[in-house]
Image (cartoon, rainbow, N blue to C red):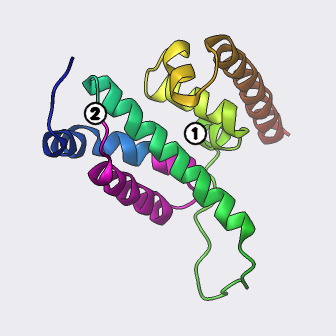
Amino acid sequence: MWRISQEEAFRLAVEKYSDTVYRAAVHHCSTTTDAEDVVQDVFEKLLRYRGAFSSEEHLKAWLLRVTINRCHDLTRASYQKDTELDETIPAPAQADGSVLDAVRALPDNYRDAIYLHYYEGYTAAEIGRLLGAPANTVLSWLRRGRGLLHTMLKEEIEDEVV
């Protein structure tokens, strides 16, 4: 079993996985400010976490799962707020039509599976463990997500041609 102190786990996470956590947060949040807040929350949770990690991969998976969950929490909270629009705040940058923008537009399960598989390199079984779903379900999410991406990007190209 992998033995590492809480302090060493935190140091390793910050040094090795800060960029990974930030990329996942940016991918799942609507603004970079929210993503930065998520990163801070994730590492704060790691400081308070009292469990043990069985391996470095377990630590990385824990970080990604907490990041995705925190992003989903922010998304839910933004829909539940009943606040007025502040006209002085600039609008976020518009989507640039990239494949990543199309991935972000997918439903949560498809988006998470595609991001973890293609951007972070996880297998369907590993994604299933991270997201709490059977590997075959993850494979279905990947297949359906790719199909939706194909349709979305094909329509975008056809619109540009016209």
Up-down relation of residue 37 to residue 5 (above or below): below
| Nearer the camera: disc 2 or disc 1 | 2
Which of 126 and 47 lies nearest the eye of the viewer? 47
Report the quarter where the N terminus lies.
top left
Residue at 16 percent across and 45 percent down: it is 11
Q: Crowding near pointer 1: few (<14 within 10 Å), some, many (20+)?
A: some
Characterize the magenta stretch by its predominant secondary structure: helix
How far from the left and from the top, in percent, is residue 5? Answer: 14, 38
Neighbour class for label 2 at 10 Å: few (<14), some, many (≥20)? some
Q: Residue at x 46, y 20 (%)?
A: 122
- The reply to whether the magenta stretch includes residue 50 is yes
Q: Earlier in the sequence, mark 2 or mark 1?
A: 2
Q: Residue at x 38, y 40 (%)?
A: 63
According to the image, label 1 marks what residue? 100
Left or right of residue 56: residue 138: right
Check residue 3 for magenta coloring: no
Q: Is residue 134 above or below residue 109?
A: above
Left or right of residue 155, residue 46 in this image: left
**Looking at the figure, which quarter contains the C terminus?**
top right
- Quadrant of residue 104 in the image? top right
Q: Is residue 120 left or right of residue 3?
A: right
Q: Circle 1 — which element?
A: helix
- The answer to whether residue 94 is above or below residue 137 is below
Mark 2: which secondary structure? Answer: loop
Question: What x and y, as percent, mark residue 12?
Answer: 18, 39
Residue at 64 percent of width and 37 percent of height: 103
Identify the amino acid type marked 2. Ala
Q: Nearer the viewer, residue 162 or 63?
A: 63
Residue type beneath disc 1: Leu
Residue range highlighted in magenta: 25-51
Dot 2 corresponds to which residue?
Answer: 52
